[in-house]
Amino acid sequence: MSLSSHVLDGTTGTPAVGVSLRWERLASGHWEPVAHAVTDTDGVTGWGEAPQVWQVTGESVAGAEACVTGPLASAVVGGDCDDLVDLTRRAAGAVARNHGAKAAVDVALHDLAARRLGVSLPVLLGSTRHRVDTDVTLSAGSADELAEVAATRVKDGFGVLKMKVGTAVTPMPRDHSMPASICSR
């Protein structure tokens, strides 16, 4: 088993065993990783992600990547892909804190287990639903900016929106009517 933080086999467009996988996004003029993967010796890949917002979590992209490719990889690589309990315990105990990196590996291990069994991740986790709704966070901004982004996210399929209406760095007056006014647009 390999644990990695995105490169696909260019000839097949699929993850290759032993190849580091890394999904990246362009942010502030540079590329940063956003997802991590676990690939078994049969080429089956499980995906997990750990968005890092160090102003909120105290964790950085560089720290998460170092944690995933360092102590977390050391803890799970070589383990039995079919022993999810052992692998998740190893990952959880490999390093202190680093909750985002550990969560990414935990989800990737669960996703790998589901794929190896030929079921969806929700089914592996006991759900009878095949779709898991999630939310999207809208960053702090004016009511007009939030309304525009909210409309785009609803068109993208999100039914739950989390709105930030201020930060500790740039406090905004509390306007409890703001979410209602955005939703009514």
Image (cartoon, rainbow, N blue to C red):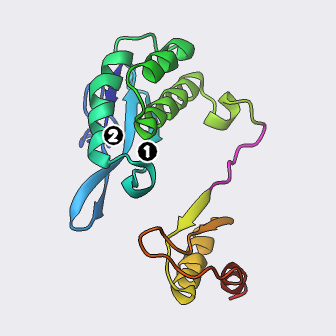
Of pointers 2 and 1, the one earlier in the residue sequence = 1
Q: Is residue 147 left or right of residue 183?
A: left
Q: CA distance from mark 2 to mark 1?
A: 8 Å
Q: Residue at x 39, y 29 (%)?
A: 38
Q: Residue 164: horizontal and vertical position, in percent?
A: 56, 70
What amino acid is labelled 2 in the image? Answer: Ala
The residue under label 2 is 64
Q: Is residue 74 visible?
A: yes
What is the span of residues highlighted in magenta in the rendered image? Answer: 128-134
* Observer-nearest of 98 and 89: 98
Q: Residue at x 44, y 19 (%)?
A: 93
The residue under label 1 is 50
Q: Residue 165: horizontal and vertical position, in percent?
A: 56, 75
As drawn, 58 above or below 118: below
Q: Is residue 23 visible?
A: no
Q: Residue 54: horizontal and vertical position, in percent?
A: 37, 53
Please identify the quadrant where the C terminus is shown.
bottom right
**Which structural element holds mark 2?**
helix
Q: Residue at x 58, y 82 (%)?
A: 173
Q: Residue furthest left?
A: 30
Q: Residue at x 57, y 62 (%)?
A: 136
Quarter-of-image position of residue 71 = top left
Numbered label tally: 2
Quarter-of-image position of residue 115 = top right
What amino acid is labelled 1 in the image? Answer: Ala
As drawn, 78 above or below 16: above
Quarter-of-image position of residue 85 = top right
Give the main secondary structure, helix, strand or loop, of the magenta stretch: loop
Magenta run includes residue 46: no
* Observer-nearest of 52 and 24: 52
Q: Are marks 2 and 1 in contact (CB under 8 Å)?
A: yes
